[in-house]
Image: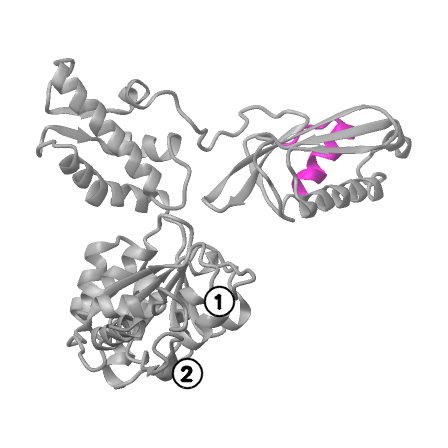
């Protein structure tokens, strides 16, 4: 047998294994789709509405040449599981392809048969595994794709996701056009850091972080029953009260999703299972907020802590982070000097410019504020934002800086129990 025979046999095996005609029967029952989405995910009403609109159009149009859905949101909010729910509600087979760290174009298009050990790209490998030509294909973490000397996989994805081109996708290994137009593509991403031409081919659906009430409902409906079962506890052996669950959300987690919350609930379950085994606790007890320090340790985060007294040099502001809104303390002190402004606390360029602008406003308005002009040149201002290891940026802290710098000169404290932004 010649050396070429094994190459030809491998090529023929791939040609036969890839689905050319077989389809799964797609369901177009919107009521069932809505029921599946509601069963699997709490909240996210706008996202569900957009998905149902997309499915309703698919029901009427035989071949939908619409944009690819791209679910953008922070980690842990349910982007991947939403894709699974869409597949289950429409009776499509579900395929997931992780794109994080993909840097080689051959991962998408495959290697040419002249190379030893060459294979089709991951795309057609996954299609072969699915066995049908109309699955739901989830392209996970599309913003994490990179590029190097081996090519740009993001550019290779253009042909895959463009409805005008993907009916004739050409893999380097097969060298035969393959029709991807029946595939329902759904992408997920944590940020909008996606190449422009690729983003232009997708319709972005933003998935916001969960609110406190939504996290509480998710914990009580899904996470607590799930972790109770996984840790070998029977129904009624433990009950995590609503107040205890709220304390876990507020003081032991800081996230947009619910992954960390699930880990903390799992930790509570494990600790109680151990206590039952050692005879330290009796089953059937409720987990109360005052029991959490013994189970989970000291509180990790402060929640909604503002100043009770009016203080000169300290203000509570409202801040936006990737995990949601929170309170941010800004501290200002003045010392004898020559009018310099010192800024500390891992501040970004925009926030530093905001401080300079606030200082200029106070200087320009010094007469109306009742501040002597010569005071500015005789005092140094030091502005510090606590938690120095955490980067901070944004233009919305300007009004806070004006307050704090102004009161260093007029010695009139602003209201401490109020947060401000702008």
Q: Quadrant of residue 163?
A: bottom left
Image coordinates for residue 363, horizontal then vertical, percent: 83, 40
Image coordinates for residue 301, horizontal then vertical, percent: 44, 29
The one nearer the camera, 124 or 27, is 124
Q: Which mark is residue 154?
A: 1
Q: Secondary structure at mark 1?
A: helix
Q: Is residue 282 left or right of residue 82?
A: left
Residue positioned most to the front: 1
- Residue at x 8% of width, y 33% of height: 234
The one nearer the camera, 231 or 54, is 231
Q: Quadrant of residue 397?
A: top right
Q: Main secondary structure of the magenta part?
A: helix
Task: Check the picture and name the quadrant holding the N terminus.
Answer: bottom left
- Callout 2 crowding tier (Cα within 10 Å): few <14, some 14–19, many ≥20: some
Q: Which mark is residue 165?
A: 2
Q: Which mark is residue 190?
A: none
Q: Is residue 201 left or right of residue 32?
A: right
Q: Is residue 259 left or right of residue 31?
A: right
- Residue at x 46% of width, y 45% of height: 324
The one nearer the camera, 46 or 136, is 136
Q: Is residue 14 visible?
A: yes
The one nearer the camera, 145 or 141, is 145
- Callout 1 crowding tier (Cα within 10 Å): few <14, some 14–19, many ≥20: many
Q: Is residue 1 depicted above or below 318 in this figure?
A: below
Q: Is residue 403 magenta?
A: yes
Q: Secondary structure at mark 2?
A: loop
Q: Quadrant of residue 23?
A: bottom left
Task: Looking at the image, tell me whether mark 2 or mark 1 is earlier in sequence order.
Answer: 1
Q: Is residue 65 visible?
A: no
Provide the residue span drawn in magenta: 399-414
Image coordinates for residue 42, horizontal then vertical, percent: 26, 52
Q: Is residue 339 depicted above or below 5 in this figure?
A: above
């Amino acid at each position: 047998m010649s050396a070429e025979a094994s190459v030809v046999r491998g090529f023929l095996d791939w040609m036969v294994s890839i689905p050319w005609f077989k389809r799964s029967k797609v369901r177009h029952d919107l009521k069932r789709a809505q029921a599946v989405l509601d069963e699997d995910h709490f909240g996210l009403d706008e996202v569900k509405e957009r998905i149902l609109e997309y499915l309703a159009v698919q029901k009427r149009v035989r071949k939908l040449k619409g944009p690819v859905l791209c679910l953008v949101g922070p980690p842990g909010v349910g982007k991947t599981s939403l894709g699974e729910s869409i597949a289950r509600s429409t009776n499509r087979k579900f395929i997931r392809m992780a794109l994080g760290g993909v840097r080689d174009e051959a991962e998408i298009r495959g290697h040419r048969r002249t190379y030893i050990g060459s294979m089709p790209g991951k795309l057609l490998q996954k299609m072969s595994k699915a066995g049908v030509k109309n699955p739901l294909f989830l392209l996970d973490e599309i913003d994490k794709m990179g590029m190097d000397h081996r090519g740009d996989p993001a550019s290779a994805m253009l042909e895959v996701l463009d409805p005008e081109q993907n009916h004739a996708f050409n893999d380097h290994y097969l060298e035969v056009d393959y029709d991807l137009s029946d595939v329902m593509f759904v992408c997920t991403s944590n940020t909008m850091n996606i190449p422009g031409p690729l983003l232009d081919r997708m319709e972005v659906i933003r998935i916001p972080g969960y609110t406190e009430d939504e996290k509480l409902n998710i914990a009580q409906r899904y996470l607590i029953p799930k972790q109770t079962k996984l840790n070998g506890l029977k129904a009624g052996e433990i009950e995590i009260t609503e107040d205890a669950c709220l304390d876990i959300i507020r003081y032991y987690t800081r996230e947009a999703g619910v992954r960390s919350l699930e880990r903390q609930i799992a930790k509570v379950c494990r600790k109680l299972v151990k206590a039952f085994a050692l005879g330290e606790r009796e089953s059937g007890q409720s987990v109360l907020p005052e029991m959490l320090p013994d189970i989970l340790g000291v509180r990790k985060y402060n929640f909604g802590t503002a100043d009770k007294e009016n203080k000169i040099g300290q203000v509570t502001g409202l801040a936006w982070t990737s995990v949601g809104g929170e309170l941010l303390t800004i501290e200002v002190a003045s010392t004898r000097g020559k009018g310099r402004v010192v800024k500390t606390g891992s501040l970004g360029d925009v926030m530093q410019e905001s401080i300079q602008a606030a200082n200029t406003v106070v200087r320009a308005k010094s007469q109306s504020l009742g501040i002597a002009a010569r005071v500015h040149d005789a005092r140094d201002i030091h502005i510090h934002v606590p938690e120095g290891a955490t980067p901070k940026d944004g233009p919305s802290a300007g009004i806070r800086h004006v307050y704090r710098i102004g009161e260093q000169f007029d010695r009139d404290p602003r209201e401490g129990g109020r947060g401000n932004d702008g």
